Amino acid sequence: MENKHQVPVTVLTGFLGAGKTTLLNRILTEQHGQKYAVIVNEFGEQGIDNDLVVDADEEVFEMNNGCICCTVRGDLIRILSGLMKRADKLDAIIVETTGLADPAPVAQTFFVDQDVANKTKLDAIVTVADAVHLSSQIEDHHEAEEQIAFGDVILLNKIDLVKDENIDVVTKRIRKINPFAKIIKTTKCGAPLKEILNLDAFSLKRILEVEPDFLESDHDHEHDDDVTSLSFVSEKPLDMEKFQNWFGKLLQTKGQDIMRTKGILDFKGENDRYVFQGVHMLMDASPMGKWPDDKERSSRLVFIGRNLETMNLKEGFEACKSE
Amino acid sequence: MTTDLNQFPQLDKTKFEQRGIQLEIGVPVTCAVSIGNYIAAGFGDGTIRIFSSGEKHKTLKAHKGVILCMAKDGDNILTGGDDGYFLKISLNGEINEITNFGSRWVDHVAAHNGNLVCSSGKVVYYWDKNKKEPKSLNHDSTIGGLAFDAKGRRLAVSRYGGVTVWKKDYSNKWKSTKLDWKGSHHKVSFSPDGKYLVTSMQENVLRCWRLKDKLDFAMSGYGSKVKSFAFIDDTSYLATSGAIDAICWPFDGEGPMGRKPICLPYIGNKQVTFIEPFPDEKAIFAGLSDGSVFYLKLKMRIIL
């Protein structure tokens, strides 16, 4: 997998009017000498200045694999396969979703379709959020909350229109849903492009490099359907079999509510670090080399999703510790 | 590549390889058709190359982008591209534009006896050979494949959720019948005898309908997507890609239900990715994921 040339795909998401097209046009005008393909939804209103723009219509369908949350973007499979036949090599592909889209099917497409996964890779999900309206959008539309939950990078845009104390309120709201995304505060989406493109956020190696703060998070939310996150740490090695049984069953039964998972695991009797990351029920996991000598071995995992407090995650994780 | 060659260290250049020519074009080949003694191949840079034995091949610049699909219409080649053009190209290299959809891709093309058809997005466009303007046939989702039956009376359109079969009634009006099965259907084909309709799906499976009573069934067990399949020896077998062996399902008699397929094996562990029937013989060419091609003969026996 590592040696294959895979074109990175950046997914731009964000609620209506947040500034996705502004960001897209910034990327296209600033990155000189790079060849990009841009996949946009056909109802986009603003013009996009690029020679390779493909209209998509966000056809989401369910895979026949007995998993109701495993939905993929059929149009994306078709378009990416067409783009990979081009004579000129693309430096990157950018997919802009509609404002009301759930980012999960886009991400899942890269897990499920082998042809897509062979030639392209999901680089990162970049969510543009409107600092003025985000709080009310999250209250009224579950899509807005999902877009925050799935973001690897969140551009908190239009901060020039908001008072400082309100920016803090919005930032806290984002952190409660997704404590691991990088938040960049911008006006007119003016973020350095190196913080948006080529992040490799979905690679297991990258999870190790970034080492996000897996903190024990508090959960004091108001509504039951809020998206929250929970994370767990264990200094004691885990029993591999117990963990696999617990985690496998958890994703199978609660995968619809669990949106994203990430973790670094220390199994008893194993020399390697195990790293995984998942979207709903789908997961990518692999041993990633020995534990570094200068680091304490420990297991850390994080969940982002709905109804997490009903899943007995703490008890389940505790029970996986080795005897 | 080296490991693959090591599997057959004893092999010299085969007779096929000695007879053939090899061209390094540096652009992906996207599609090909054979017309009499000619072979036309489409490429990712919009060019078409027409080959015939004993002559130097012709190179034509046909499309601005990728040639996505190709079919033959008598002695002509039909192509659709990501530049939105649907073209008819003669073997001497004359290019005629049939239509142009602008930024929308032409995903699939097909023809029967001078009647032309192409799809772009969710719409199929049908040109009767006696008419200039096409008839639009609308569908609810993007089209995955197109196929006429052997007589050209029915047109199968695969899509999300199944296949729509279009047929002209006696008053020359288009009537459609839906064959539904959940999931995304891609390549579609009628059996040469017209009794069955087969689709390949997003999952590693083929779906088949027996048309007289709409009985449907799956052919499964593949290790990867079944991208290529073809009926051989009229309708006696359906040869399929998607596994390490070329899997051939029996379609004679009562069809494949409850019967096991013949597996045409070769020595190796590469997936079969392409199937091309060998005309007038119970044999196929099987293309493999490492680029090699095998000629495989069916023996008249069913493995139980």
Image: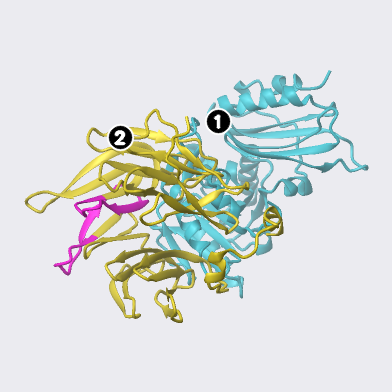
Query: In the picture, which quadrant includes the N terminus of chain B?
Result: bottom right
- Secondary element type, mark 1: loop
Closer to us: A207 or B211? B211
Judging by the rendered image, the residue that carries numbered circle 2 is B253
Which residue corresponds to the image point at 32% horizontal and 65% vertical from the top-left? Answer: B72
Q: Is residue B142 left or right of residue A52?
A: left
- Look at the image and say whether residue A170 sits in the magenta stretch: no
Q: Is residue A40 left or right of residue B232?
A: right
**Disc 1 to disc 2, how far (Cα)?**
49 Å
Q: Chain of mark 1?
A: A
In the picture, residue B88 is in which quadrant?
Answer: bottom left
Q: Chain of mark 2?
A: B
- Secondary element type, mark 2: loop
Residue numbers of the magenta segment = B126-155
Q: Colour of chain B?
A: yellow
Q: Is residue A207 left or right of residue A98?
A: right
Indicate the position of residue B191 as horizontal and vertical percent values. Answer: 30, 46
* A153 in relation to B204, above or below: below
Closer to us: B115 or A300? B115
Badge 2: residue crowd in 10 Å (few <14, some 14–19, many ≥20): few
Which residue corresponds to the image point at 32% horizontal and 45% vertical from the top-left? Answer: B235
From the rendered image, report the letter of the chain displayed in cyan: A
Closer to us: A67 or B231? B231
Judging by the rendered image, the residue that carries numbered circle 1 is A257
Residue A136 visible in the picture: no
The kind of residue on which mark 2 rests is Gly
